[in-house]
Amino acid sequence: MELQINDQRVTVAVEADLPLLWVLRDLLGMTGTKFGCGMALCGACTVLVDGQAVRSCVLPVAQAAGKKITTIEGVGSTPVGAALQGAWQEINVPQCGYCQAGQIMSATALLQVTPQPSDADIEAAMSGNICRCGTYTRIRAAIKQAAAHAGQTK
């Protein structure tokens, strides 16, 4: 099966129903995408597939074949991803950090579609991402800072 991950083509020999998360982590060594709940409820495993935030723990790899997959390892090469990663560092968003890759991926999907997000837009886009440390206020601030940095303020 051929996949396009972070603008590189990769061929993997796997069962079609294997979750994308395990292909990324176990076969390709891309451990930035985290396993959280295994049921698409927490958002730790979020990646972008054709620009959409998806939960890789429940996405069969066959459904990602032929689509553009972006992980936390590659998102920094995009203007929006780089702005978000910079804002995350400046504001010191993470505490434990476990959920943060998924948070950044969901925020990237948001800013790509809504470059001037309101608080309601941010809350809606990020609602599926759980942060056990409760850094939601800093996450919102980082998203707003990234949007402003890119000249996309609201």
Image (cartoon, rainbow, N blue to C red):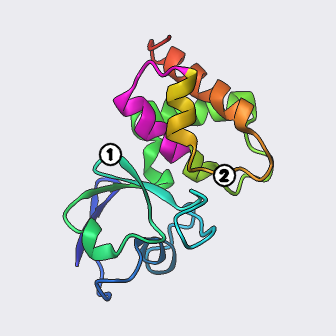
Quadrant in which residue 28 is drawn: bottom left
Q: Is residue 10 visible?
A: no
In the image shown, does 136 or 81 lie closer to the viewer? 136
Quadrant in which residue 87 is drawn: top right
| In this view, 61 is above or below 74 | below
Residue 105 counted in the magenta span: yes
What amino acid is found at the position of numbered circle 2 in the picture? Ile
Q: Assign the magenta stretch its main secondary structure.
A: helix
Which residue is rendered at x = 49% and y = 46% of the image? 105
In the image shown, does 7 or 68 lie closer to the viewer? 68
Foreground: disc 1 or disc 2: 2
Pointer 1 residue: 51
Q: Is residue 137 visible?
A: yes
| In this view, 13 is above or below 11 | below
Q: Earlier in the sequence, mark 1 or mark 2?
A: 1
What amino acid is found at the position of numbered circle 1 in the picture? Gly
Residue 120: x and y, percent?
54, 26
Which residue is rendered at x = 40% and y = 72% of the image? 20
Residue 2: x and y, percent?
22, 73
**Residue range highlighted in magenta:** 104-118
Pointer 2 residue: 130
Measured Cα–Cα span from mark 1 to mark 2: 21 Å
Residue 44: x and y, percent?
59, 59
